[in-house]
Amino acid sequence: MRRRILGFLAIAALVLATVGVASAQQFDWKQFSGTKIRFLMNQHPFTTFIQPLLPEFEKETGIQVTFETFPEDQFRQRRLLEASSGADTLDGYMIMPGQVGAQYLEAGWVRYIDDYLNDPTMTDPNLDLNDFFGGALNTFKSGGKVFGLPLQNETSLLFYRKDLFQQAGIARPPQDMAELLADAALLKQGRVAGFAMRGKAANATSQIVNFLMSFGGTWLTADGKSALNSYQSKQALAFYADLLRNYGPPGETNMSWPEVTSLYAQGQAAMIFDANVFRSIMEDPKQTTDVVRNNTGYAPLPAGPAGMKPVVLVWGLSVNHASKNPGAAWYFIQWALSKVNQDKAILAGVPAARTSAWQNEEFKKTAPADWIDASQKSFAVGDPNWNPPVKPVPEVRDAYGQAIVAALEGKPVGPALDQAAQAIDQILANQ
Amino acid sequence: MTERASRFFDRNAQWLFPLPAVLAILILIVGPVLANAYISVHDWFIGATPKYVGLGNFARALSDHRFWAGLKNTFYFTLVAVPVELVLGLGIAVLFNRDFRGKGLVRTIILLPMVATPVAIALIWALMFNPSLGVLNYFLESLGLPRSLWVASAQLAIPSLTIVDVWEWTPMVALILLAALQSVPTELYEAALIDGAGPVQAFRFITLPSIRSAAVIALILRSIDALKTFDIIYVITQGGPGIASETLNVFAFKTGFEFFRAGYAATLLIFLLVAVLGVAVLLNMTRRSPS
């Protein structure tokens, strides 16, 4: 009997030991110590924020990360070249699925991470996927599978000069498009533009799409043809051209975000409409004049005939399909987008993709209340399809961009959009 | 080295010595051109499988208004920029052919634009062209002149861009012409002086004919380069407003690397290659023809 008990105990001990071994196979940040990985990054506030923290990651994990950072256009070309060439020295990159998702998924350039998510040795138990904004996480899912994690929600807001509003006797930021037009007229003073936004062809489409949707327009019809020749789309572009030709700055057709934000930062525009992340520019004493920095207010997109329909842009990080070290790359992504780092990111002005970051009390103290409020209102209703849901996105944006430039040059809007729609249908037929 | 090997090298020296150069040309020039030609007969959306389309891309180019606009812009840019560079370059060369105090310093300074990185130059010019915040409009205004839209205007985009090209490349023309000027024997001028020729006549009948050949070389080099200009145009306007400053090169780049249509982009570049080669051959003929 005693022997039996002893035997039983021995077996129990063995079982416990096995369990002990199993529990030793837990998530271990040091698992990939000694690995070197390389990420391609867009020159973006998130990159600027996370770069100085990389030594911390190296200390915590022993993984050495190198960033290669380029301005957006060059970044995208570089990423395309490296992803398509199957370079195994590239381990991960920033990606915006609303921009290139269709192309990258179809070509198989991003690595799905479900196997990691289901593997307790590969996924930090504190990752908490449910903490990410649902819309943001959804843009990183395809057919129920996950191919990356969102790092930020971005939306566009109206930046406006409270002091100039007061001088012009305007009590509140414009609530709808009619008010926007009226306010722009009141605010235009000599060389100071009443309102400015992007007008540089394809670059402008990411902003004008907010107007397009708020006027009831869409990129595509139900049967997948271009809808840019619709009545609503023509109304939207006509409104935009009217606004900017009458109350905008000179040289609109050459303005992308650097021109728009610096114009505003130098006090040359009373209102602009662009990405909410540019709050970091407006709070930087090196880039703005004092009067602009101390008087900037934020408001959501004014409502159009179809309501307030902003788009949200979701950037995130993905593992390169050909990476030699996909595990280490995934570790980096988890670390970079952990609750702790997303909390820090939002304090650095990056509109974090985790809901918890937006509840951070410290953040609420540092960010202007109207910016938080306007951003969250926009995230709540935002549509992540700021691009047409097709593969040749840049070509379609370019075609729309040509119509935008034509409208800003004073050419009739109707024929310009008819031509753009025709070009887009041809592009889609040839893809 | 064995005797056999050494004999082999001796006998084939005429093949072996140029071999590295030949290989370099094959790999760096012939290879890419052939690859480009191969790609140009395919419909290849990067990421998808290429489809053979024969001359389909070429036919498409000929009926594409953007191709013709690009071709026109390419030549417009070159025809404005290069003559100005030649005239200014000649002026500078004549000036530097004399002696004056601080000549060495001025000569170094004037070469700086050519040495600087083109993208950096382009970014600075883009800032200067900015119609609201740029320094060029500030200058215009302080001279009592109206402000200009510069590259933000469809009409002025190419002329404005040529200012950058002229600023950047006139020094090279000046350098070539200066070298030619310095090789003109001074005896010729002395003889002309004795025969009663004035400075204008000396310039017309001695200087110009003596540097003609160098001028044509400068013209060929600058024309080839100007037809292929990419960096300053892409950085400053990206071909805009609309397609007002989109040259063939910029259009091909967008087609390939932004729109991912590698086949069509390769086709556009073949047209550019033919245009550049054609111009180079034509100009070269004027160099050989008797004056």
Image (cartoon, helix red, strand yellow):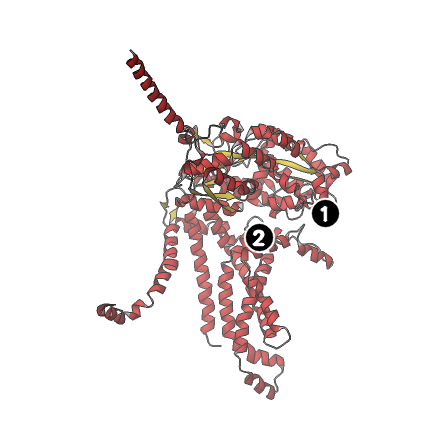
Kind of element beneath mark 1: loop
Q: Residues within 10 Å of mark 2 (few under 14, many from 20)?
A: many
Three-letter amino acid code at the position of disc 2: Ile
In the image shown, does B69 or A193 lie closer to the viewer?
Answer: A193
Q: Quick check: A106 above or below B90? A: above
Residue topped by disc 1: A191
Which residue is rendered at x = 22% and y = 70% of the image?
B3
**Which part of the image, by quadrant, shows the C terminus of chain A?**
top left
Residue A236 x %, y %: 61, 36
Which residue is rendered at x = 56% and y = 68% of the image?
B86
Q: Say whether residue A231 is visible.
A: no
**Which of the 4 image quadrants contains residue A329?**
top left
In the rendered structure, find residue B236 and report the number of the disc placed on it: 2
Which residue is rendered at x = 57% and y = 50% of the image?
B240
Q: Chain of mark 1?
A: A
Residue B60 x %, y %: 43, 49
Q: Can you name the residue that lies furthest to the top here? A: A1
Q: Is residue A82 left or right of residue A220?
A: left
Same chain for mark 1 and mark 2? The answer is: no
